[in-house]
Image (cartoon, helix red, strand yellow):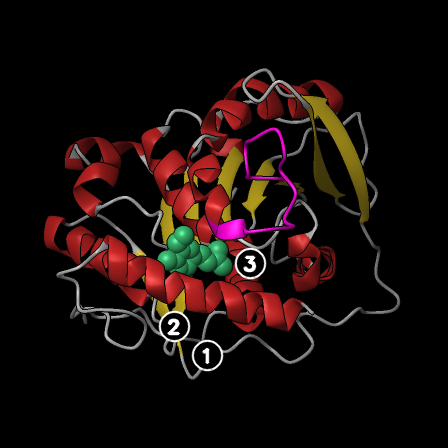
Amino acid sequence: MKKILLTIAALTCGLFIAQAQPGMGGGFGQMPQINVTFDPYVEAPAGFDAERPGIAHGTLESVEYKSESVGTIRKATVYLPPKYDASKKYPVLYLLHGIGGDEREWLDGVPNIILDNLIAEGKAKDMIIVMPNGRAQVNDSKEGNVMATFPAFAQFDKDLLGSLIPFIESKYSVYTDKMHRAIAGLSMGGGQSLNFGLANMDVFAYVGGFSSAPNTNMPEVLIPDVEKTKAQNSLLWMVCGSEDNLMYNSSRLKAFCDEHGIPCTLINYPGEGHNFVVWKYGLYKFAQLIF
Ligand code: FER
């Protein structure tokens, strides 16, 4: 069922690009090729995403918060690291889903297992991961014509900054400065992370885009002030599958950053398209670079 939905979404996506961006070379398979130098792809070790017996495990929980901007009670999924202890403080990664997903989509990428393993090996800091619903509208369900919910993804910054972050900071024992907040996401969530993360560098020091979608702003919009971004962003990190026709969203930003001397990573995941192989890898790498 999921496969069918994704196929429908992918076909619709192709049409959307062709219509929305005439001049850009048509639909899937003919997107503009942007020449960039990718950062080296280093394979994740076997078992990075497999549950390991004998290590401490974190927990997953579902939470609800009142959204001022949407006017409803909204849901998020929260990962608490192993032995979460309210007498300590934790950094927070906000992890966003794609056009066909909701607050549970990332569970397909086993973020709890990936983080449990990284934390057990001392490769990532203890952290809380918040997986919200990024479709900021009254009916935020992933059922029906998800492509029609595209505009609601652009409204999510108000809910995130105005309601979700304050809620998380009141409910959990977390740091509340930018050096302890990261934002990353897959596809539409990658676009949101780049758009919101770079527009709010006082809130998020670390920004990740995995297979970022056509909602990704143009580089000049993402980075209107090169010197400010250099000074205020601590990590701008991207990955995209080599077979993913959405690569141009990432490569045009990488090209802009290289041209202006802004530190930026873009890994070209070999042989993969728009899927959780790439997104799990993205989380595995990104989680080791933050905090
Ligand atoms: C599009 C191509 C891809 C698009 C959205 C996507 C609305 C998003 C895909 C995803 O989130 O998985 O043209 O336009």
- Tag 3 near tag 2, CB within 8 Å: no
Residue in front for this viewpoint, 270 or 56:
270
Residue 37 % position (x, y): 21, 70
Q: Is residue 33 left or right of residue 203?
A: left
Label 1: few (<14), some (14–19) or many (≥20) C-alpha neighbours in 10 Å: some
Disc 2 residue type (three-letter): Asp
Is 135 inside the magenta-drawn segment?
A: yes
Residue in front for this viewpoint, 148 or 249:
148
The residue that label 1 is drawn on is 272
Residue at x 37% of width, y 44% of height: 194
Q: In the rendered structure, which disc, 3 or 1, sits on the residue that comes first in sequence? A: 1
- Tag 2 near tag 1, CB within 8 Å: yes
- Tag 3 near tag 1, CB within 8 Å: no
Q: From the viewer's perspective, is the residue at label 3 or at label 1 nearer? A: 1
Is 195 inside the magenta-drawn segment?
A: no
The residue that label 2 is drawn on is 244
Q: In which quarter of the image is the N terminus?
A: bottom right
Residue 263 % position (x, y): 26, 51
CA gap, disc 2 to disc 1? Answer: 7 Å
The reply to whether the residue tagged 3 has its Cβ within 8 angstroms of ligand 1 is: no
The residue that label 3 is drawn on is 283
Q: In this view, does 199 lie above or below 83?
A: above
Count how many numbered circles sit on residues in the image.
3
Residue at x 25% of width, y 53% of height: 20
The reply to whether the residue tagged 1 has its Cβ within 8 angstroms of ligand 1 is: no
Q: In the rendered structure, which disc, 3 or 2, sits on the residue that comes first in sequence? A: 2
Classify mark 2: helix, strand or loop. loop
Q: Is residue 107 above or below residue 44?
A: above
Disc 3 residue type (three-letter): Leu
Residue in front for this viewpoint, 216 or 172:
216
The image's mark for residue 61 is: none
Q: In the rendered structure, which disc, 2 or 1, sits on the residue that comes first in sequence? A: 2
